[in-house]
Image (cartoon, rainbow, N blue to C red):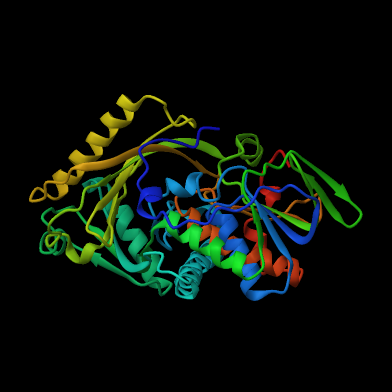
Amino acid sequence: MNLHNGHLYWPESYTNITHFPKLEEDIACDVLIVGGGMAGALCAHVLSWETELDVALIDRRHPGSGSSSANTGLLQFSSDKMLHELMEQMGEQDAVYFYKLCQDAMKDLTKVASELSEDPEFRQQKSLYYASSKEDVAKLAREYEALKKNDFPVEYLEPSDISSRFPFSKPAALVTSGDADVNPYKCVQIMLKDAAARGVRIYEQTPLLQKNKTVHGFTCESEKGTISARYIIFATGYENDFLAAKMGADLNRSYAIVTEPVPSLRTWYKEWMIWETKRPYLYMRTTKDGRIVAGGLDEDTPEAPLNEGLIEERGERILQKIKEHFPDLSPKISHAWCATFGESHDGLPYIGEHPNRLGEYYCLGFGGNGTVYSMLGANIIKDLITKGAHPASRLFTIERAESF
């Protein structure tokens, strides 16, 4: 599947990558991770840091070159579905529990970043979530009450509060604390490099061609080698559109740009991350070297377009949105791309063990919070393998997918 097209920024921002061998022999391990993107890298990090399990990881390409290289790196505990919306969908107790889990996952991501051998350009940030229209103010007020009632770090801003901080005003906004931004590609590369140093065997250009269940686990065949594993974790993201379809995920495409470094971002209040209530939504953040990352214009088509002219046109539209918010800035596009992303039918990730194949696990962070969900998934699957249970696993079961 074509996961992205266009001119990606992150792979150019970090070139000190490690190339791993292709599997050309038969090996055995305790856990085989399939997929070397953000989800697979977090699973490898957690398992190699916190357990004594023998772990191997395979990727059909170079690890991190799929969706992770097109990820815009906004990390938030808030979901694309507001807390009060989830309360109506799944009940107040479970909705709050889910948001608390995402908040804990943000703390875990902060810890992971501190454990890495290099700086993944991880910065703790606040997020400005504004009402795109007056009609959305009531919805934002309900969200503020739901978050405040349950002790999430949130502030409510009136139009004057927003205009006193930014060169634009909106009908209302929420400010949440405990969020972050990151260079996702660099983070994946460093996590895998460090995991390899702790003994994780990593193989690139190694597709999984066939998987067979055995008495003791699984036999996984690639082009030139076979892997015998007690457990297998699928962390394939949006790569496997057949799997995504079985899970009931809706695959779409989104556009993003990165600008040249902007001389001064003084009117961008504390470089807070910005997003809005409208769907599809515009989102914006900055980088450590003063660039602006922005995206949106989602479309109901899974395949990233090959048409460079279309990507350029969408990029210019996103750039215009930046200028509408920050008329004092004159940013110029340096990179523009389009990428596939997916959302589950209920807004929650798929994390857990296959209902019919014991020992087969999934860490699929479908949704706008893919990295946060992947952190959550890595911790849950670690406990499922080592302890046999995790209290949160009931929320994210694979059984939610009708075809399973």
The residue nearer to you, when weighing 224 against 76, is: 224
Res 306 seen here? yes
Q: Where's residue 31, x and y in %?
A: 74, 60
The quarter holding residue 386 reads bottom right
- Left/right placement of residue 18 relative to residue 262 reads right
The residue nearer to you, when weighing 138 against 163, is: 163
In this rendering, is residue 162 above or below 276?
below
The quarter holding residue 30 reads bottom right
Q: Where's residue 215, x and y in %?
A: 92, 54
Image point (34%, 27%), residue name: 308
- Left/right placement of residue 88 relative to residue 363 reads left
Q: Where's residue 254, x and y in %?
A: 39, 38
Q: Quadrant of the N terminus?
A: top right
Residue at the left extreme of this rendering: 328
Residue at the right extreme of this rendering: 215
* Number of numbered discs on residues: 0
In this rendering, is residue 93 above or below 232?
below
Q: Quadrant of the C terminus?
A: top right
